[in-house]
Each structure stands twice: as C-alpha cells, then as structure tokens.
Image (cartoon, rainbow, N blue to C red):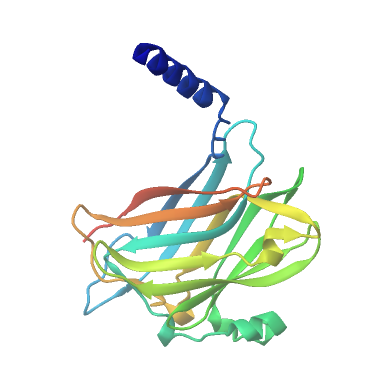
Amino acid sequence: MRKLVALLAVVMTVGAIAAAPSVAQQPQTSVDANATVTPKKAGTKKNPQGVKLSGTVKWSSEAGVEPPIVTAATVYIGKGGNYNGGKCPKCSKATLKRDADNCPKKSIMGAGSGNAYADTVITKPKVVFYNGGANWMYLYTTLFNPAFVQEPVPARITKVGGKWNYKVRITVPENLQVVAGVPIALRDFRYTVGGKKYAKDYIATTSCPKGNKYDFQLETEYLYSDNTRSKSATADTVPCTK
C-alpha cells in the first residue's frame, strides 16, 4: 500500500510539472561601445591635460526580437581623469526646454548623432552636449521623424569610490522614448565631447593608470513591445601614455 501511495505521489508531481506553464525567456539585447581619448598622453595633477572624448555605441537584438526602447544608461569611468563642469560656462535644463538659443555658446561641449528605428523607418536623432554645471550634462536631442521633438536628456555626473572615479546616469525622457505613438529604438550613437578651445579642461586627464589604460563600463536598460524590461552591459579600456 505504501509503495502504491508513493508511486501515485510521484506521478502527480511529474504531471504537475509537465502541466505548469513554461517561463518565457527574457528578450536579449547586447550593447557594444568603444572610446578614444585625444591626446593619449596623460597630464598630471599639477598639469592636467584637456582632452576630447569620442566614440560609438551600438545595440543589437537577437533574431526575431523587435528592437527595444533604450530607457536609460549608466556609464562608469575609471581613474585618471577629472570632470570640470563646475568651472565652465553652463546652461540650465529650464533654459534648454524654453529655447536652446538662449544658452551661452560656450556652454556647448560636443555633439553626437545616431540611427534609430521608428517602427520600420530609420530616424536620425541629432544631439548637442551642453554643460549643466558641476554635476550635470544635457544631451539636447532633436528628432525630426516621426514628429519634431526637441528635449534635453539629463546626464547626472557623480564622484564614486573604489575602482571607478565617476558615474554618469543618463535618463531618456518619455517623450523621446515614444514619439507620435511610435516607439523609438536606438541602434547606434556616435559622439564627441570636450576639446573646445574655450573650455579646454572641461574633461582633463591627470594620470595614466597602471597598464596604460583607462577603464570604463556601460550598462543600458531596455523596454520591449510586450512591456518586459532587461539590461545589458559592456566594459572596455582606452589606451593612454605617461
């Protein structure tokens, strides 16, 4: 009798497992990034070297998955450099939202451009980097298709400890995530920041770390058409000389 009861219990357990709905696999999107610091020769704490930072970011999704909206990004920057936004001309988010033409020309610190899907059509956002002060940078984004939108994307810059020197938190406003009812799925982005004659120390190097490289890590966050969310990250280094 005990053997029969045990056998029935096993059969019922196996049946319950077989009948249970399978857990849907989370969609996968990968991110790849590279960066260049110019000039490569690092400065020192006494004599910082103003630099230009440029690079590209690319996103790719697995086959059969609709490209997601990029909702946010976090960049971790290693030792060896300083952000000096508090010492340079700046523009506020409120001024940018009213009219970017009212910002000081010397608060412009760079530019970028990208490609994104707006449904099945490619749209090309244009970005101007504005200095927002000691803890902020604004990626003033203009989109022409599927509708005309201009919006400052805030990037909060904070000092952190341990391996990293800075954390940059970028949050994409909702009116750039969905435009005229169409989701905007960013696929690549190219940028250049710093290196301006009127703000030569906006980004400056003060050392070339061990191994002759600067470390960085990028994590991006996604929203899919079925309202699921995911994250992916990439890490790399930028060469330097002493």
Question: Which corner quadrant of the image does residue 219 belong to?
Answer: bottom left
Q: Residue furthest front?
A: 1
Quadrant location of the N terminus in the rendered image? top left
Taking the spot 43% from the left edge, 49% from the top edge, the residue there is 233
Residue 145 placed where, x, y %? 79, 57
User: Could you tell me residue 136's position as x and y percent?
Assistant: 48, 78
The answer, for residue 99, to whether it is visible in the render is no
Position in image of residue 121 (x %, y %): 77, 46
Answer with left or right where residue 223 lies relative to residue 74. Answer: right
Is residue 28 something that shows in the picture? yes
x, y percent for residue 142: 70, 66
Q: What is the total number of numbered labels drawn onto the structure image?
A: 0
Foreground pick, 39 / 70? 70
Residue located 48% across and 81% down the image: 198
- Residue farthest to the left, as pictured: 210
Which image quarter is the C terminus in?
Answer: bottom left
Image point (55%, 45%), residue name = 59
- Work out whether residue 226 or residue 204 is closer to the camera in this orientation and state it: 226
Q: Is residue 174 above or below residue 227?
A: below
